[in-house]
Amino acid sequence: MAITKVRVQINGVWTNCTKNSEGKWGCSPTAPAVTSFNLSGGYYPVTVEITNDAGTVVTYNAASETIGTSLRLTVKETIKPVITLVSPTNGALVINNKQQITFKVTDETGGSGLNLASLSLKVDSNTYNQSSAGMVKTEIANGYQFVYTPQAALADGEHTITINVKDNDGNSATAISTKFKIDTVPPTLSISSPASNLITNTKSLTLSGTTNDATSSPVTVTATLNGTDMGSITVSSAGAFSKAFTAAEGNNTIVVKARDTAGKETTITRTFKVDTSVPKLNSASISPNPANASASIQIVLDIS
């Protein structure tokens, strides 16, 4: 008996084999382009068809006894999953000390799918997974969206997020690492002039004070005088500011706001009075006049 033809089939494609110098038959088919993870058993069954010179054809496949397990081809994809951080974005300043972290993880269409057991979200030195308290998972096309809400308040200042995941064929995504800052404290603000409830005889005054924010500097200062914007106010690197202005006769109100880069504000309102009028003596009377030495006298003045 002589073997005249040998061919193999993988995923519906036949490839003819040739006999080598050692008397063995071989061929070099191309593996299917799609992972076998989602197939029954997780493999592509390989069929071998052998024909001899008498015309007898015998077939072996993945279900054949003894040899069947050798005819099971496992194909793995090579495309990494993709991680997309939705919020907070890199460098974000937030005012919520339980800031939600929202991200998406996806695999390619027809891929092996995500190995959710490998999912990790690291916030500073703490690592969380899909089952952690505060983690909510929603299915989306080719993957999932996760929203994690910290169960304990995060401290003001900078925090680091790192996210990673693998697919079911062992491909690791390119990890995302980003930083954001929490600021729950508004900037400090103090006003040195004008003094509260000041009464002055001049309209030319100066608004001055200091401000600072340890987490979200620089701080911007704005002010209104009687509801009108006072214009640009420069804040020094040390936090000092001043602005010359002209007040109105009578009662005045200044509202000063300090705002940090996280959007937190501190407001101080000052009221004061300008009175530029000059007192006038309209009349004067002395009684008695003339008066006896060492006697008590009365003086009456009419002033406006």
Image (cartoon, helix red, strand yellow):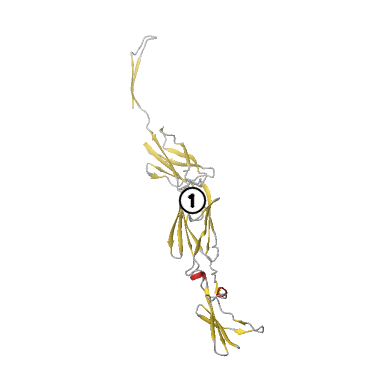
Percent position of residue 297, x then y: 36, 13
186 over 146 or under it: above or below: above
164 over 27 or under it: above or below: above
- Residue displayed at 58% across by 83% down: 17
Q: Can residue 41 be seen in this view?
A: yes
Residue tagged 1 = 93
Percent position of residue 62, x then y: 53, 75
Of residues 217 and 129, the one nearer the viewer is 129
Task: Name the quadrant of the C terminus.
Answer: top left
- Residue displayed at 48% across by 51% down: 93
Of residues 54 and 112, the one nearer the viewer is 54
210 over 76 or under it: above or below: above
Task: Name the quadrant of the N terminus.
Answer: bottom right
Give the image quarter of residue 138.
Answer: bottom left
What element does badge 1 sit on?
A: strand
Percent position of residue 42, x then y: 51, 69
